[in-house]
Image: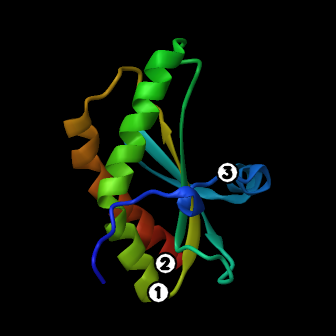
Amino acid sequence: MSATYSYNTTEKLKSRKLLDQLFTKGRSVSVFPVKAFYMPLLSDAEVIVQAGVGVSARNFTKAVHRNRIKRLLRETYRLNKAILQEGLQADQKKAAVFFLYIGKEIPDFVTLNELMPSLLNKLAIAIAKA
């Protein structure tokens, strides 16, 4: 399977109901400064992984900064998501994932892009065990 670097609408986690379940019943793994909440999905979902991103308004009061960090998170996920998809496809599992930035400073692309593969590997292992 060749890696596709898209992040289209079907892959985005938008369902309010699913987000609520993710934060109440889901589990999390963390590689500072990103925390990932995850929950296995039923096998009838159309995509392997549905992902969303978020940044605390308490730590970043300016919307410009929150939007910048969310854009960086989406971009690093998009470039490295093949790691998670291949791990889940091998176990024939599907999942909902939400990446939350928990740091206090605005990150740069290089830093996030270096830590995302290790976070996705931890995530794939954790979902496989669930």
Of the numbered discs in the image, which one, if any, rests on residue 91?
Answer: 1
Helix, strand or loop for disc 1: helix
In which quadrant of the rendered image does the N terminus lie? bottom left
Q: Left or right of 46: which side holds 5?
A: left
Q: Residues within 10 Å of mark 3 (few under 14, many from 20)?
A: few
Q: Amino acid at mark 3?
A: Lys
Distance, label 2 to label 1, CA atoms, is 6 Å
| Above or below, 31 relative to 5 | above
- Across and down, in percent, residue 37 comes to 56, 53
Residue in the image at 39% along x and 68% along y: 84
Q: Residues within 10 Å of mark 1 (few under 14, many from 20)?
A: few
Q: Of the residues tagged 1 and 3, which is closer to the observer?
A: 3
| Above or below, 25 relative to 82 | above
- Across and down, in percent, residue 89 comes to 44, 83
Q: Earlier in the sequence, mark 3 or mark 2?
A: 3
Tag 2 and tag 1, C-beta contact below 8 Å: yes
Of the numbered discs in the image, which one, if any, rests on residue 20?
Answer: none
Residue in the image at 56% along x and 76% along y: 94
